[in-house]
Image: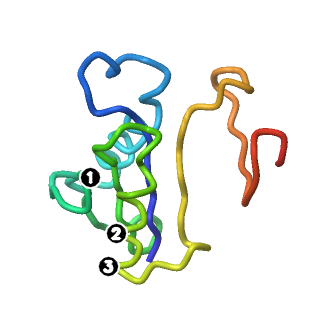
Amino acid sequence: MYLIVGLGNPEQDYSNTRHNMGFNTINKLAKQYEIEVTRNNFKGLYGSGIIEGEKVILLKPQTFMNSSGESIKEIMQFYKIEESNLIVIYDDIDIEPGIIKIRKTGGPRNT
């Protein structure tokens, strides 16, 4: 099972900002794969389904960005999800819009 987390800020003021790119990505995945992200628990909104043959949970933490780890930790512990099966989607000011950077660990300079 994979946990795919989209980071953002839950308030309406942030809905159309770059900071909510993670939420927007989760919304697109949910629509494309017909996964309802409506369950409210683990300090977030989440739903489960299948993407490309893999069981996934899509999560939008409802804490602010700096506290999103609380939501992620709770759901990972509950479902016993391995760290290697965690995908976090967020904006990165260090790269141009439209560019995707994939990394396993580290800060903004690691790739």
Three-letter amino acid code at disc 1? Gly
In the rendered image, residue 48, in percent from the top left (x then y), is placed at: 28, 66
Q: Residue at x 32, y 43 (%)?
A: 63
**Neighbourhood count class around disc 2 (C-alpha, 10 Å): few under 14, some 14–19, many 20 upward:** many
Distance (Cα) linking label 1 and label 2 = 9 Å
Q: Is residue 20 above or below residue 90?
A: above
Helix, strand or loop at label 3? It is: helix
First-in-chain label (3 vs 1): 1
Task: Confirm or deny contact between disc 2 and disc 3 (CB under 8 A).
Answer: yes
Q: How many numbered badges does the structure rendering display?
A: 3
Q: Residue at x 70, y 30 (%)?
A: 99
**Extreme residue toward the bottom, this view:** 80
Task: Confirm or deny contact between disc 1 and disc 2 (CB under 8 A).
Answer: yes
For the N terminus, the image quarter is bottom left
First-in-chain label (1 vs 2): 1
Q: Is residue 11 above or below residue 50?
A: above
In the rendered image, residue 78, in percent from the top left (x then y), is placed at: 32, 79
Residue located beneath label 2 in the image: 75
Distance (Cα) linking label 2 and label 3 = 5 Å
Q: Residue at x 53, y 65 (%)?
A: 86
Rendered image quadrant of residue 69: bottom left
Q: Out of 23 and 41, give the one closest to the viewer.
A: 41
Three-letter amino acid code at disc 2? Ile
Residue located beneath label 1 in the image: 44
Q: Out of 61 and 59, give the one closest to the viewer.
A: 61
Residue located beneath label 3 in the image: 78
**Neighbourhood count class around disc 1 (C-alpha, 10 Å): few under 14, some 14–19, many 20 upward:** many
